[in-house]
């Protein structure tokens, strides 16, 4: 299931927990010389290396791009994971993108300078891709974008209101809010930047840099929280904080190339 109760649960969907229909789609798209799909599924469902090979294969990706009905055959989680990992793979091979990304990340004088290896390690990090795909899938349900937890009565459209909530919240909810601010800002800037442009021009005098600043800061706070360590998210959240601008660019590219082709 994609709908979660708490933001730390964004780590839960993994290649070992694909739905039956997702696994069947991968196998039918990938395997060409056998048709005992159920038997194959039982053999490979716990093998993340084999599942990764299927997800990254040209045959599976071609099925997604050539068959519009494939978009509705699989869960949003698998769809976003397929598109995201393909985009990350392509951008790793773009030397100009890699050089520009390092220049951008180093322009803010980080404590640990970015080099090519560090950037490529980030772009190859399966847990980072998994977290982002989970977040994108969760936010396909629009109500989740404006609520810290799905069952909440309160809806928040402004970051300052989320921050005020965190100041009066217990430790667990505080962590959820920190994650949600990071997710909220990343989704808005990466997936619907036009929304921010509209608000800047017509409603509020805050631009994309405002959202980037809060996204980096609150992913950073989330990464240092005890719940991040408990849920093995510290490194993932830290990387999202430190490379926030580049993750935004990756989402822009994914959107333009594969979701909203012009």
Image (cartoon, grey):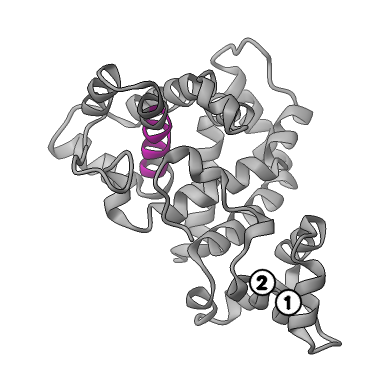
Q: What element carries label 2?
A: helix
User: Which secondary structure, mark 1?
Assistant: helix
Position of residue 211 relative to residue 196, above or below, is above
Q: Is residue 170 above or below residue 21?
A: above
Name the image quarter holding residue 44.
bottom right
Residue matched to label 1: 27
Q: Residue at x 48, y 57 (%)?
A: 256
Magenta stretch: includes residue 21? no
Q: Can I make out residue 240 in this image?
A: yes
Residue 97: x %, y % from top left:
65, 40
Q: Which of 123 and 163 is in front in this view?
A: 163
Residue 183 forms part of the magenta stretch: yes
Q: Where is residue 110 in the image (x, y as percent from the top left)?
A: 60, 13
137 vs 195, left or right, is right
Q: Residue at image x 80%, y 59%? A: 47
The residue tagged 2 is: 23
Q: Residues within 10 Å of mark 2 (few under 14, many from 20)?
A: many
Residue 258 percent across, percent down from the top left: 53, 63
Q: What stretch is highlighted in magenta?
A: 178-188
Crowding around mark 1 (Cα neighbors within 10 Å: few <14, some 14 to 19, many 20+) is many
- Marking on residue 132: none
Query: Which residue is most to the right?
Result: 33
> Does the magenta stretch mainly form a helix, a strand or a loop?
helix
Residue closest to the eye, 110 or 235: 235
Marks counted in the figure total 2
Q: Nearer the viewer, residue 59 or 42?
A: 42
Disc 1 to disc 2: CB gap under 8 Å: yes
């Amino acid at each position: 299931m994609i709908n979660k109760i708490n933001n730390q649960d964004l780590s839960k969907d993994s290649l070992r927990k694909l739905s039956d229909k997702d696994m069947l789609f991968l196998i039918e798209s990938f395997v060409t010389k056998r048709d005992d799909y159920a038997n194959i599924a039982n053999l490979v469902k716990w093998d993340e290396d084999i599942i990764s090979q299927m997800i990254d294969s040209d045959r599976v990706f071609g099925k997604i791009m050539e068959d519009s009905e494939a978009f509705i055959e699989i869960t949003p989680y698998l769809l976003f994971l397929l598109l995201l990992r393909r985009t990350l793979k392509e951008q790793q091979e773009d030397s100009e993108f890699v050089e520009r990304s390092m220049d951008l990340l180093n322009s803010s004088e980080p404590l640990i300078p970015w080099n090519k290896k560090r950037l490529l390690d980030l772009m190859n990090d399966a847990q980072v891709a998994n977290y982002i795909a989970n977040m994108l899938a969760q936010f396909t349900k629009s109500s989740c974008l404006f609520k810290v937890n799905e069952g909440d009565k309160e809806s928040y459209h402004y970051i300052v209101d989320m921050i005020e909530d965190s100041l009066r919240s217990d430790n667990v909810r505080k962590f959820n809010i920190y994650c949600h601010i990071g997710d909220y800002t990343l989704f808005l800037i990466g997936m619907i930047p036009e929304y921010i442009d509209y608000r800047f021009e017509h409603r509020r005098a805050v631009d994309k840099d405002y959202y980037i600043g809060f996204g980096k800061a609150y992913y950073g706070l989330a990464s240092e929280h005890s719940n991040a360590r408990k849920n093995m998210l510290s490194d993932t959240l830290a990387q999202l904080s430190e490379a926030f601008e580049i993750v935004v660019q990756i989402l822009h590219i994914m959107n333009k190339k594969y979701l909203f082709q012009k």
